[in-house]
Amino acid sequence: MGVTRGETFLAEVPALTCGRLRPAGTTATEETLALYIHWPFCVSKCPYCDFNSHVRASVDQARWREALLADMAWEAAAMPGRRLGSIFFGGGTPSLMPPQTVAALIEAAEKHWGFAPDVEITLEANPSSVEAARFADLAAAGVNRVSLGLQSLDDRALRFLGRAHDVAEGLEALGTAQRAFARVSFDLIYALPEQTGEAWQAELERALGFGTGHLSLYQLTIEPGTRFAALAAKGELGQPDPDFGASLYELTGELTEAAGLPAYEISNHARPGEESRHNLSYWRYSAYCGIGPGAHGRRGGTATQRHRKPENWLSAIERSGNGIGEEIDLEPSDQGMEALLMGMRLREGIDLGRLGPFIDPEAAERLGRQGLVERDDERLRATPAGMLVLNSLLAELAA
């Protein structure tokens, strides 16, 4: 329902801890912790990618394994007392990591923190035949969920996106992943130049037929510092049409909902119970540790960031035992605003009992009358129409 005029969104400022606005009645030790491990290396740099990924002629695998283990030990000492609910190997291309390194990191994480009974251990993978050949070994190492970067089911689009695989190789890797892992997700990028609504509908319907329980579906964006941004600046690549993108976004939501994989976050769709628990920890502003080059963390009310350049991170580890480049103590208001910005991405929205103080009540009422947000006694969430203009909506909501 819409926001009702005269209702108040204000509440007492809640307790803040470990990068999270803690729910009433819980203690820090009752919550699980998320661990992010960044592997920064790729075979090649995709033209749309602004992630912290790097191409190197060679990687000293033993040196990197020991450095990641040292960085993890430092974080475990800084954030003790919680079991891990999830581990996420991101990148870069972590499927390029030797399975022995993955196994060593998982084993060390369990020794440092212990695992929740249903711990989720995700690894991002490229769908090349070389990397797919490692899937069985990665599963034996403890990975129980894989996120596969298919990106498209059209060979021409894959060439445009700079991907090294073709559709046939990608689908073969998907089949291998479904045999090796209990849970599989894959990514697709849409709203590409010259892509029609009919073509995207056919591609998405095909993707929904593969039977995975999770899809990450992203519109193409031209990010600063990427090769696509340089091409756009020279007039060699057009900017995506926002109106066309909005129509495809609505179509995407309709098709995934009908297939039983509704959007639970602005770009992520899952069968109920198969949502990414690790990513939910970010969006719900739970505590998480991040290790590896450029990795971020939120622990003890402190924001952490590792050195971004791989060589600088590695030198810091060998010099001081950790790769931290920056630690910032966050004010309660900063934590509240971060939690608001993350939580409104979710279909479930935000808990007003915790985040009410960070919301402009007049703006919330106005946006409710416009059909962009809705609320009940406990939560505020963006409507489907509000999700289309989420950035501007958040700018208005923030107190």
Image (spheres, rainbow, N blue to C red):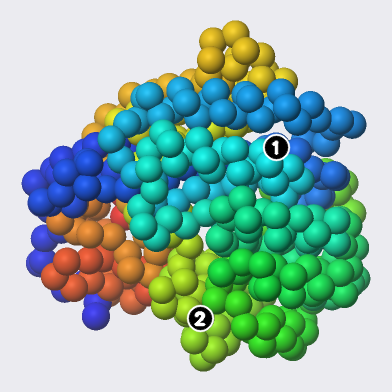
Q: Quadrant of residue 315?
A: top right
Left/right placement of residue 164 relative to residue 355 reads right
Question: Residue at horizontal 77%, vertical 84%?
Answer: 199
Label 1 packing within 10 angstroms: few (<14), some (14-19), many (20+): many
Q: Is residue 282 visible?
A: no
**With respect to residue 204, does 126 lie above or below?**
above
* Between discs 1 and 2, the one toward the N terminus: 1
Left/right placement of residue 146 relative to residue 200 reads left
Left/right placement of residue 134 relative to residue 389 reads right
Question: Residue at horizontal 85%, vertical 61%?
Answer: 129
Q: Residue furthest top?
A: 319
Residue at numbered disc 1: 40
**Residue 284 point in image, percent of width and height:** 35, 54
Viewer-nearest residue: 293 or 4:
293
- The amino acid type, in three-letter code, at marker 2 is Leu
Residue at numbered disc 2: 261
**With respect to residue 16, does 220 lie above or below?**
below
Viewer-nearest residue: 8 or 108:
108
Question: Residue at horizontal 60%, vertical 8%?
Answer: 319
* Label 2 element class: loop
Viewer-nearest residue: 104 or 363:
104
- The amino acid type, in three-letter code, at marker 1 is Pro
**Residue 195 point in image, percent of width and height:** 79, 76
* Label 1 element class: loop
Q: Quadrant of residue 187?
A: bottom right
**Residue 94 point in image, percent of width and height:** 69, 46
Question: Residue at horizontal 61%, vertical 66%?
Answer: 181
